[in-house]
Amino acid sequence: MSQQPIAQSRRYDPIEIAQYYKYRPWRAIWRAITIVSLFAWFVIGLKWDSWRQREEENKLKRAAQLREMLTHLGPTFIKVGQALSTRPDLVRKDFLEELVKLQDQLPPFDNAIAFARIEQELGRPIAQMYGEISPNPVAAASLGQVYRARLKTGEEVAVKVQRPNLRPIITLDLYLMRWAASWLAPWLPLNLGHDLTLIVDEFGTKLFEEIDYLNEGRNAEKFASNFQNDPRVKVPAIYWRYCSSRVLTLEWINGFKLTDTKAVKAAGLDTDTLIEIGVTSGLQQLLEYGFFHADPHPGNLFAMPDGRMAYIDFGMMDQLEQSTKETLVDAVVHLINKDYDDLAVDFVNLGFLTPQTDIKPIVPALEAVLGDAIGQNVGDFNFKTITDKFSELMYDYPFRVPAKFALIIRSLVTQEGLALSLNPQFKIVEVAYPYVAKRLLTGETPQLRRRLIEVLFKDGKFKWQRLENMIAIARTDNNFDLLPTAQLGLQYLLSQEGSFLRRQLLLALTEDDRLHTAEVRRLWDLVKDDLKPAQLFNVALSVVAGNILDERAALF
Ligand SMILES: Nc1ncnc2c1ncn2[C@@H]1O[C@H](COP(=O)(O)OP(=O)(O)OP(=O)(O)O)[C@@H](O)[C@H]1O
């Protein structure tokens, strides 16, 4: 068997990889010796500390050593480190903080190799494609490096070229990891709830997707189409004529990386608006489109001089199912309403707990951890504190983080960290909850309307306070207009689908044998400034007229 198939494979296939290295054992053995000796050296260091009772004193040094070791071992291990940096359930906190730094840690590779690769991949001399290209890369990352260039037609572009021999290195490491996973799993004190080899396979599949730049280009276009009507979000265009699976040519983004907070501020850009764009577009990805950027670290986000925010690096994206998006909305609402019984059920539905888990003892634990984190004020909520506290819970209860959520959690924590670096007073919930409340109240889809009803009724009783809270919070979002929402609400209430809600509302109004006028008055006081009676009358009239027309249309 030749080297060719492994270097060319586009898809991760563990069987094919195992076949290939079965006939090249010396390569596997040599690499295994390197990896094992580095890890052994690291573990001996930890044991030495513990023997001399210097663990506390040396813990930062050891964490840095771990990061350096993974960097030394190359792209696969850097990616493992990046993935582990999202797993507070598996990794110690001090290690976690070092692993988060595993971005852009590799030295660049030779320019001559990079240019030869561009020509070989695109089948033409560089000078025929690019009018200019920077002599050195502007950035070197784990899998590739990026040059700034100009097309013959004048457009400014970024040219991303993959590191040489990436597939052979990655396949060999994955082969060894898979082998180790199958042999070591029974001895590891991990509560993963999965077969360890499946985890390696999932990681391998994602990594192979990431090193296919054509896939990244397609992701960028899909992401762009989701945000095509949003004038605040920019996605670079892909120049397909100059792309292959190892070279990507995309529109150059002129702007300031959000890591460079000084430059962003010096350019006079409004950081609060940027944060709002970042958090809202992040929530839209998760809760509306279900297609999300799984690596939104600040180096992948740019503030543009015209106030837009640009995303780059679409190598790692993930897709959420409709039911997951809805459960996530539920979980946010339950969390804010301090509804820990329902929140525990959400955790089961999302896969954090198995359906067999007895959730009774977990509810008070959730309350202890999350009640404290949210504090008296919804605005005190902060994902970093929550994930830190959660990692403590993970040791005592059978929580596990489904792989998909590791990415979501990382995405949320990094977005929050990013926002905090621009505005230390920032409270993610002040943007997130109005967004969720607005989406529920506007109820664009039947599923969301059902969710709203579920939120408003608890144990068959209408929760006036929740509706009040939700309206009050939604109104803090400047883009929230109550009038169209009221129109949609009325339309729904008078429709066939709304008959259940009509009945429940009547029951609620007359519950406990009294007319709940005080609650209605409080609600009215809350909304009356936005909904002038005359305007409301017009809205009601148009809804009734619309209904009559619909009924007539149905008759004929
Ligand atoms: N379209 C662009 N416009 C301007 N700069 C860019 C563009 N694309 C990439 N860069 C620069 O190149 C760097 C690396 O690009 P990118 O993040 O896409 O590479 P990567 O190999 O996927 O890195 P990572 O390790 O983050 O996965 C970016 O941080 C940025 O500085």
Image: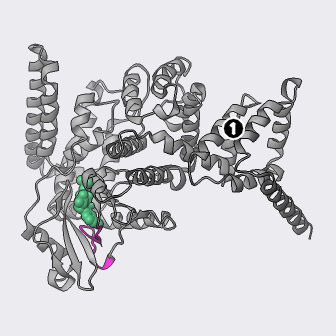
- Location of the C terminus by quadrant is bottom right
Residue on which disc 1 sits: 467
Q: In this image, 477 relative to 392: left or right?
A: right
Relative image position of residue 316 (x, y in whole percent) = 34, 54
Which quadrant is home to the N terminus?
bottom left
Q: Is residue 146 visible?
A: yes
Pick whichever, 42 or 463, lies toward us.
463
Which residue is rendered at x = 20% and y = 75% of the image?
149
Does the magenta-highlighted stretch encompass residue 150? no
Residue 183 located left or right of residue 517: left
Give above or below for 268 relative to 61: below
Tell whether 187 sits left or right of 419: left
Q: Quadrant of ligand 1?
A: bottom left
Q: Nearer the viewer, residue 258 or 162?
A: 258
Mark 1 residue type:
Leu
- Bounds of the magenta span? 240-254
**Residue 492 position within the rendered picture, expressed as x and y whole percent measured from the top left:** 77, 52
SS at circle 1? helix
